[in-house]
């Protein structure tokens, strides 16, 4: 069976507090980008096998989140061995949640393949042990996220219907733990849903990602890319998550975008959630 595990962007991101467990409480809106996805294929096998192609990801054997997701359900539900093939299109270390998406879609597909009858709530609970944003990809719809990012409230953003997105990632890898160092805590409670209910053209001065100040200071090139996206017609630009990918939202499809040769560049269109034909339910 084959599925396409999509990535996400963050619409605003505020770091609210440092937790006693070492994580941070945040507030953000996760929004799926269905058009940019990895390809995940799982088939029965005599022994467990995992192979990965496409964009190279340097992880030790057994450490890929797809492998961890299988191991989790293998132990909990006694599922048999499978062969898993993952083709990576989503760049990693980018703040796009590609690895988390792969893990969540693995849980979803194994649940379907072996008739485990796990509810969405149970799948989210398993996913939360794999990564803070993994639970989002179980339902994979625009959602307000709080806590570590695992407490989700579906929140459609109709303003994005029929708008276009460009994602630009230079050859920069940002470790999430390092990204939190030096970031300031947001003290006031900001109503992200109120902000995104306004026209997208108003987001530029109101919808902020707390990681940007610190990360732009460390990596000035990212700030230049943000300015370049605005110059090339974007109505809103932001770092996604803790970076290093930036995305621009466009009212009309950009005919061409110009960045350095080492940049990963993706262009697509936002898809209405009601039109999403994701085969894994």
Image (tube, helix red, strand yellow):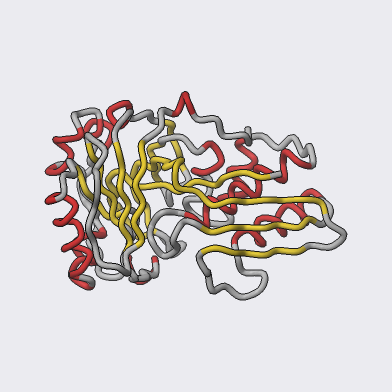
Q: Is residue 208 left or right of residue 172?
A: left
Quadrant in which the C terminus appears: top right
Quadrant in which the N terminus appears: top right
The spot of residue 68 in percent (x, y) is: 65, 61
- Front residue of this view, candidates 259 and 278: 259
Above/below status of 129 relative to 158: below
Residue at the far top: name it.
Answer: 274
Above/below status of 75 relative to 161: below
The spot of residue 12 in percent (x, y) is: 27, 46
Q: In which quadrant of the rendered view does residue 138 lie?
A: top right
Q: In which quadrant of the rendered view does residue 204 lie?
A: top left
Residue at the far front: name it.
Answer: 255
Above/below status of 264 relative to 139: below
Residue at x 16% of width, y 56% of height: 228
Residue at x 76% of width, y 58% of height: 83
Q: In which quadrant of the rendered view does residue 64 lie?
A: bottom right
- Front residue of this view, candidates 188 and 247: 247
The spot of residue 72 in percent (x, y) is: 70, 56
Residue at x 33% of width, y 30% of height: 157
The spot of residue 17 in percent (x, y) is: 32, 56
Q: Is residue 74 left or right of residue 40?
A: right
- Front residue of this view, candidates 219 and 192: 219
How many labels were placed on the picture? 0
């Amino acid at each position: 069976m084959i599925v396409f595990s999509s990535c996400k962007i963050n619409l605003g991101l505020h770091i609210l507090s440092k937790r006693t467990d070492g994580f941070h409480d945040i507030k953000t809106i996760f929004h799926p980008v269905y058009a940019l996805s990895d390809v995940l294929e799982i088939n029965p096998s005599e022994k467990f096998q995992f192979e990965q192609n496409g964009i190279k990801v340097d992880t030790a054997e057994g450490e890929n989140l797809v492998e961890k997701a299988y191991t989790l359900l293998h132990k909990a539900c006694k599922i048999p061995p499978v062969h898993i093939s993952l083709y990576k299109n989503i760049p990693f270390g980018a703040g796009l949640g590609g690895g988390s998406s792969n893990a969540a879609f693995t849980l979803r597909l194994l649940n379907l393949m072996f008739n485990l009858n796990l509810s969405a709530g149970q799948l989210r609970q398993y996913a939360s042990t794999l990564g803070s944003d993994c639970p989002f990809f179980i339902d994979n719809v625009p959602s307000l996220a709080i806590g570590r990012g695992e407490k989700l409230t579906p929140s459609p953003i109709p303003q994005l219907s029929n708008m276009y997105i460009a994602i630009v990632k230079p050859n920069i890898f940002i470790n999430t733990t390092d990204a939190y160092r030096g970031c300031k805590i947001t003290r006031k409670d900001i109503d992200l849903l109120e902000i995104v209910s306004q026209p997208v053209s108003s987001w530029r001065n109101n919808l902020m990602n707390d990681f940007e100040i610190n990360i732009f200071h460390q990596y000035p090139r990212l700030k230049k890319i943000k300015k370049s996206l605005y110059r090339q017609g974007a109505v809103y630009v932001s770092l996604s998550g803790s970076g290093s990918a930036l995305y621009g939202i466009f009212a009309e499809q950009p005919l061409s975008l110009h960045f350095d040769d080492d940049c990963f560049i993706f262009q697509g269109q936002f898809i209405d959630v009601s039109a999403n034909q994701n085969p894994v339910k």
